[in-house]
Amino acid sequence: MKVKSLAIGSYQSDNNIFLAPMAGYTDYPFREVALKTGYGLSFTELVSAKGLLYGGRANDELVFCGQDKKRTAIQIFGSDPYSMRCACESEYLKDCQVVDINMGCPVPKVFKNGDGSALLTNVKKASEIIKECVKSGKNITVKIRTGLKKGDDVAREYAVMAEDSGAKLITIHGRVREAYYSGEVDFEAIKKAKESVKIPVIANGGVFTTADADELMEKTGADGVMIGRGALGDPFICAKLLGKQPDFTLKEFILQHIDNLRSFYPERRGILEFRKFVSYYFRGAPNVKDVKMQLFSSEDFDKTKEIISTFLTK
Ligand SMILES: Cc1cc2nc3c(=O)[nH]c(=O)nc-3n(C[C@H](O)[C@H](O)[C@H](O)COP(=O)(O)O)c2cc1C
């Protein structure tokens, strides 16, 4: 794919390969090490705008960006325009240059409140939210899906609305709500949206290999790609797309990830978080059954690191 820098309002990204927001995965410990492989921008998982206004320790964890403030967008969700703007203006987001609005989350708990992908049925409300958030002075971006059910295509309409409302970039996950995260990506819907706006359009969905990224870019004409699950299964996918040799090995990547978890969470919590990655890190590798069992039963970081160090030669 053609690598290029992107202007997101006043923010300039180094390149057009973005790490997707993934609740329960793209926390600070993972983003910190993933960003070292070259992503132009990463995103926090969705954070409740109202939750940011009520305060609480969970927020500190969710929005923490450490040294990576410049390359981390904070994603917020909600459907009350004023609360969304107040969240953008809150102390929690003071160092953040790009705020992304979630208009794609399919989860019932979120949808039932009129948040996330429910906003795809209310273009007027969606526009009000964007306009209100833009008043905060942040560079506002929006992440949508192509609709709610099979056959829907709201991408073009929402891209035009987002641009008219002041958004500086739109990411289109080329699937509908009912598809969740699987199934074919609607290249055509993304392409039509891209052709209708001047702001950068990022295509998302189904990138697991560099060939997938090339196809997504080619078939949609998008300005860049956002990679979700592919970034968990292949920690070096971004480096490959950039044509760069990563500065470290898979073993070093995983050990760094573990060290980050160790500094960020209490031990038990960190171990549980790490277990979620085990299947991704070892997907497709031969003779992993035993090592996976060992990792799933390890209760402390030293033991976990020892297992990784013994199993992976590099
Ligand atoms: C476990 C999981 C959690 C996710 N959490 C979020 C989220 O917090 N915000 C969001 O906009 N999208 C979320 N997504 C959607 C991804 O950002 C992305 O749009 C989707 O996975 C499609 O990309 P992929 O095919 O490259 O994985 C999540 C996806 C997964 C699998």
Image (cartoon, helix red, strand yellow):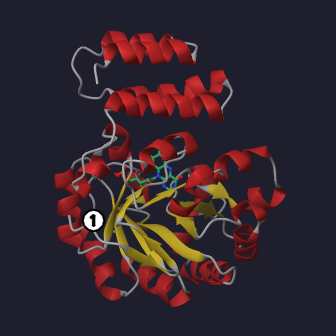
Q: Residue furthest front?
A: 247
Q: Is residue 65 visible?
A: no
Residue at 63%, 84% (x, y): give it: 131
Residue at 74 percent of width and 72 percent of height: 89
Image location of residue 1, percent across then percent down: 20, 64
Q: Residue 235: where, in percent of width, then height?
A: 34, 41
Q: In which quarter of the view is residue 263 placed? A: top right
Name the residue beneath numbered marker 1: 186
Amino acid type for the residue under numbered disc 1: Asp
Residue at the (44%, 58%) spot, across then down: 177
Residue toward you, 305 or 219 = 305
Q: Is residue 273 visible?
A: yes
Location of the C terminus by quadrant is top left
Residue nearest the observer in this picture, 248 or 115: 248
Instruction: Say which of 118 and 307 sits in front.
Output: 307
Q: Position of residue 207 (x, y in %)?
A: 28, 52
> Does 181 sit above or below residue 144?
above
* Residue 128 x %, y %: 64, 83
- Please indicate whether residue 217 sits to the left or right of residue 99 in the image: left
Horizontal side, residue 269 vs residue 278: left or right: right
Other residues around mark 1 within 10 Å, as few (<14) / some (14–19) / many (≥20): many
